[in-house]
Image: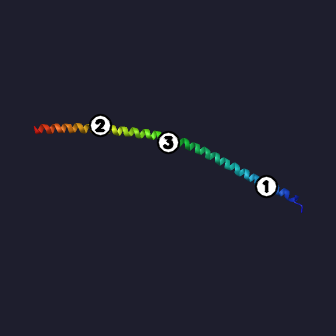
Amino acid sequence: MDYSMFVGPVQALLGALCAVLWSALQETKKKAEKTESDLAKYKVDAAMSFSTKHELQAAIESISRAIEQQSNKIDSRFDKLESRIDKMLDQKEH
């Protein structure tokens, strides 16, 4: 049997298959590039929007110091108030 008459159609089919695969590859490449671009934009947005661990620790320390300072002021005022009350009670007893 002479297979030479099948060579042309087989080559045409292979050529068409290669063209379809090439087109699919190009489309996939475009999608990958778009996804890469979107990811880069998201990373920049995330970096600008969210705090780093170091920044968060610094903020917590700052808040803790402020709370401690306020607590010390309140303690000092209560101590002064207690002292005044004690003086007043001592004066009433005498």
The residue at which mark 1 appears reads as 14
User: Which element is circle 3 on?
Assistant: helix
The image quarter containing residue 75 is top left
Disc 1 crowd rating (10 Å Cα; few below 14, some 14-19, many 20+) is few
Image-based side of 31 in relation to 22, left or right: left
Q: In x, y percent, where is residue 54?
A: 47, 39
Q: Reading the chain from its start, which is encountered first: label 1 or label 2?
A: 1
Residue type highlighted by circle 3: Ser
Binning the other alpha carbons within 10 Å of mark 3 as few (below 14), some (14 to 19) or many (20 upward) gives: few
- Alpha carbon of mark 3 to alpha carbon of mark 1: how far? 52 Å
In contact (CB < 8 Å): disc 3 and disc 1: no
Is 9 drawn above or below residue 46 in the view shown? Answer: below
Query: Residue 57: image x %, image y %?
Result: 44, 40
Residue position marked by numbered label 2 in the rendering: 73
Whether the residues at callouts 3 and 2 have beta carbons within 8 Å, the answer is: no
| Image quadrant where residue 42 sits | top right
Residue drawn at x 23%, y 36% as measured from the top left: 80
SS state under label 2: helix
The secondary element bearing badge 1 is classed as helix
Q: Name the residue at the right extreme.
A: 2
